[in-house]
Amino acid sequence: MTSDRFSGTAPLLVGVMPRQHPEVLLTAATLAARLGQPLVCAYVDEASYLVEWDPARSAHRLSLHPDADDEDIRTLTAGLQEDITAAVGSVPAGTGAVEWTLRMLAGDPARALARLAAETNAPMIVVGTSERGFSHRLSEALNGSVGAWLSHHQSRPVLVVPYRMAAHEDR
């Protein structure tokens, strides 16, 4: 992991979440390595809301569940860092090393990612598709798709990495 200040070119931005399919991070890390760009991995805590936005520092947020906040965030951060390290370590040989950092954001995922992309001048935002299953479809119907919102409401290209499943297994 590196600092938030990258030397040279603007970083690619990838939305990350716990138990996310590894294809999303691997695709973003491989693309960043091939393009010679750093990678900003961003997790958005939907159970928090933005209190103050200061691009020079972390976002000031308040949790909707303050009693379970600090330890849960530390555990979540450690797990995400392990996932990112594994993905960056899986980048094919010869494509180059990837500088990366993890940012913890609050609020609506699509808007938080768009705000961070503007702050870092990211040339592209990488997100994954939602999980299969009724509960995920219901959540997407109620909350909307992050990839769809991003592609319609901001000017940067959005790469939506599909959940890979064999056609005969897709039900």
Image (cartoon, rainbow, N blue to C red):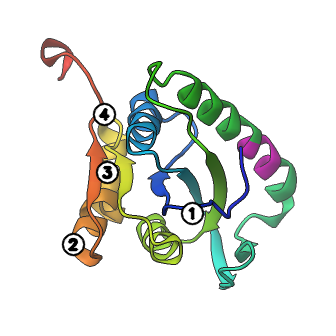
Q: Is residue 155 left or right of residue 100?
A: left
Tell me which segment is drawn in magenta: 72-77
75 left or right of 31 in image: right
Q: Give the CA distance from mark 3 to mark 2.
A: 21 Å
The Cα atoms of the two marked residues, 2 and 1, are separated by 21 Å
Q: CA distance from mark 4 to mark 3?
A: 11 Å
Depicted 66 relative to depicted 87: above or below? below
Q: Which mark is residue 46?
A: 1
Q: How many marks?
A: 4
Mark 3 or 2, closer to the camera: 2
Where residue 125 sits in the image (x, y, percent)? 38, 58
Residue 38 image offset from top left, x and y in percent: 53, 50
Q: Nearer the viewer, mark 2 or mark 1?
A: 2
Camera-side mark, 4 or 2: 2
Which residue in the structure is indicated by mark 4?
132
The three-letter code of the residue at mark 2 reads His
Q: Amino acid at mark 4?
A: Arg
Q: Secondary structure at mark 4?
A: loop
